[in-house]
Amino acid sequence: MAGRGAVGGGAHQARSWARRRAVQALYQWDLTGQDLTEIEAQFHGGQEMDRADVGYFRELLHQVPACLDELRAALAPCLERPFEALDPVERTILLIGGYELGHRREIPYRVVISEAVSLAQMFGAEDGFRFVNGVLDRLARALRAAETAGGR
């Protein structure tokens, strides 16, 4: 499969690994402001990238920052506090989820939310996954009204 590493458990598993690595890379970018190309090179040097869909990792790493203003504006009505006040891990996960909801409509909204919740359970604060779930559910209802109304 093009863009995917040599080892993995199928396309869905490879995408999950790409999201996992993207959370780590975008968290690093958020905290340090380091150049995305440098961060990408660091991640290609290891960190189990052989399991990830490398093309999707690259897309998330570069497109989430490129769409940052749009994503922040879309997320703002779904938040109860300023974007800057969010936990950096949860903020990063919400940006990835927001990007997928807005720009990857072929991915069902329930998959986007489920993946984000899993990432929040893995990397976030103890109850951060509940917060991520609620915010992305509200965003999905706003961005994908027909899909959420249909319950897909």
Image (cartoon, helix red, strand yellow):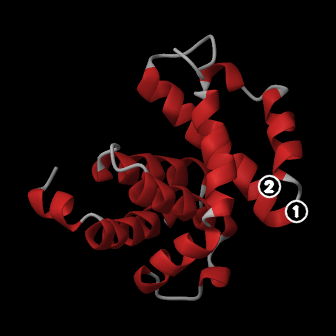
Which residue occupies the foreground of this view, 142 or 82? 142
* Residue 1 seen anywhere in this rendered image of the structure: yes
What is the number of the mark on residue 139? none
| Residue drawn at (47%, 16%) of the image | 9
- Please identify the quarter of the rendering in which residue 56 is found: top right
Residue that numbered label 1 is attached to:
32
- Front residue of 38 and 49: 38
Query: Could you say which quadrant of the image residue 91 lies in?
Result: bottom right
Q: Residue furthest bottom?
A: 81
Residue 87 in the image, given as x and y percentages of width and height:
65, 72
Residue 15 in the figure: left or right of residue 124: left
Q: Does 21 appear above or below 126?
A: above
Against 143, residue 17 (above or below) is above
Residue located at (63% from left, 11% from top): 6
Task: Name the foreground residue: 105 vs 98.
Answer: 105
The residue located at (44%, 18%) in the rendering is 10
Residue 71 location in percent, x, y?
Answer: 54, 70
Horizontal and vertical percent position of residue 5: 63, 18
Q: Which residue is mark 2?
A: 28
Q: Answer whether residue 126 is visible to the viewer in this image.
A: no
Q: Secondary structure at mark 2?
A: helix
**In the image, residue 8 lies at what x, y percent?**
54, 16
Residue ID at (48%, 76%): 75
Q: Confirm or deny contact between disc 1 and disc 2 (CB under 8 A).
A: yes
Q: Which of the 4 image quadrants contains residue 77?
A: bottom left
- In what element is the residue under mark 1? helix
The kind of residue on which mark 1 rests is Thr
Q: Is residue 38 left or right of residue 113?
A: right
For mark 2, does the 10 Å Cα neighbourhood hold few (<14), some (14 to 19), or many (20 or more) residues?
some
Q: How many C-alpha atoms fall within 10 Å of the one at disc 1: few (<14), some, or many (≥20)?
A: few
Q: For the residue marked with disc 2, what is the amino acid?
A: Gln
Residues at marks 1 and 2, CA–CA distance in whole angstroms: 6 Å
